[in-house]
Amino acid sequence: MDRAINDFLTARATPAGPGLRAIAVDGKALRGSRTHVTGHVTLLAAMDHTGHVLAQRQVADKSNEIPAFRPLLDSVDLTGTVITADALHTQHAHGTYLRERGAHYIAQVKANHPGLFDRVRRLPWREITLDHYDRTRAHHRLEIRRLKTAAFAHLDHPDAHQALQVVPWRADFTTGELTIERVYLTTSLPPGAATGAQLADWIRGHWKIENLLHHVRNRTFREDDSKIHADHLPRIMTGLRNLAIGVHRQNGHTNIAAALRHTARDRRKPLAALGLTG
């Protein structure tokens, strides 16, 4: 079923343009699937940055997402792609696998990789030139994002050529709260292979995919409230949610909840009128 959904969405997707295609890898626990005798089901997904699910895999019981990374991507064409992932997947084996498959990566670096994290964060970032600056204001909030890059002759990660620092500033006008973070990443992309704006867009795109997985599926589809737990049903229901999200995103809707309300009003229309045939 996962393959059928992914093939359907791929067939109706707009062909990718020139340049690298960004794919995010992220996992989500289906908390409502937990019972008094079994743990919750965890699914790992590969999604392009438009929100189209390319592959989905269930994480084995008593395991974590790391062993599922390679099997998940084995079925995905990684030619001309850049893979974004959180710090859990900043693994030497993952980096080597992606480079062997012809993919680049942008991987977040946190304290769970102390040697790499310490080396990256101790760079003289104050003296490094700003590569990209972005400022947005919406929903009673101001966001400023600053990106810096530093080239490396050698970094202790497969084919790592650059370290990145992203500093998001968020000012909430409702609460008066100001939040400042410092995020560190590493990438196999050599200097000049992508602009600062492209790198910033891919990093922010991954955060949007995390939001799509963790918030849209919960707020719009109330995924964590679902108590379905028997057999493969939790994974099947998630696949159907991915299908709905993918179709609406491909149709140009960014507000999935509003799109679903609109579709409900048009439920008497034939499928062809909704773009759901294929």
Image (spheres, grey):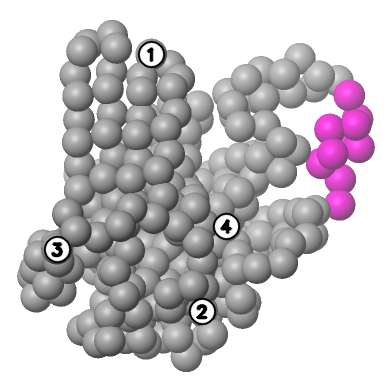
Q: Which one is earlier in the sequence, the residue at label 3 or at label 1?
A: 3
Disc 4 marks a residue whose amino acid type is: Asp
Disc 4: which residue? 48
Per the image, label 1 sits on a secondary structure element best described as: loop
Residue 160, horizontal then vertical, whole percent: 33, 80
Front residue of 82/144: it is 144
Estimate the x, y position of residue 128 in percent, counting from the top left.
25, 60
Question: Of the residues tagged 3 and 1, which is closer to the observer?
Answer: 3
Residue 124, disc: 3
Q: Quadrant of residue 6?
A: bottom right
Q: Earlier in the sequence, mark 4 or mark 3?
A: 4
Q: Tell me which segment is drawn in magenta.
A: 269-278
Q: Give the residue pinned by disc 2.
A: 103
Give the residue number, with chain letter if any, for mark 1.
140
Q: Position of residue 30 (x, y in %)?
A: 36, 45
What kind of residue is marked 1? His
Residue 101 percent across, percent down from the top left: 52, 86
Left or right? Give the position of 33 relative to 197. Answer: left
Please tell me the numbered disc located at residue 156. Answer: none
Relative to the observer, which residue lies in front, 97 or 172? 172
Label 3 SS: loop
> For numbered disc 4, what is the local secondary structure?
strand
User: Which numbered disc flags the more N-terminal residue, 2 or 4?
Assistant: 4
Give, as a three-letter code, the residue at label 3: Pro
Is 225 a magenta residue?
no
The span from disc 2 to disc 4 (Cα, nearest Å) is: 14 Å
Q: Is residue 152 left or right of residue 74?
A: left
Q: Earlier in the sequence, mark 2 or mark 1?
A: 2
For the view shown, which residue lies furthest in the top direction? 174
The nearer-to-camera label among 4 and 3 is 3
Residue at the (61%, 32%) spot, across then down: 254
| Tag 3–tag 1 contact (CB < 8 Å) | no
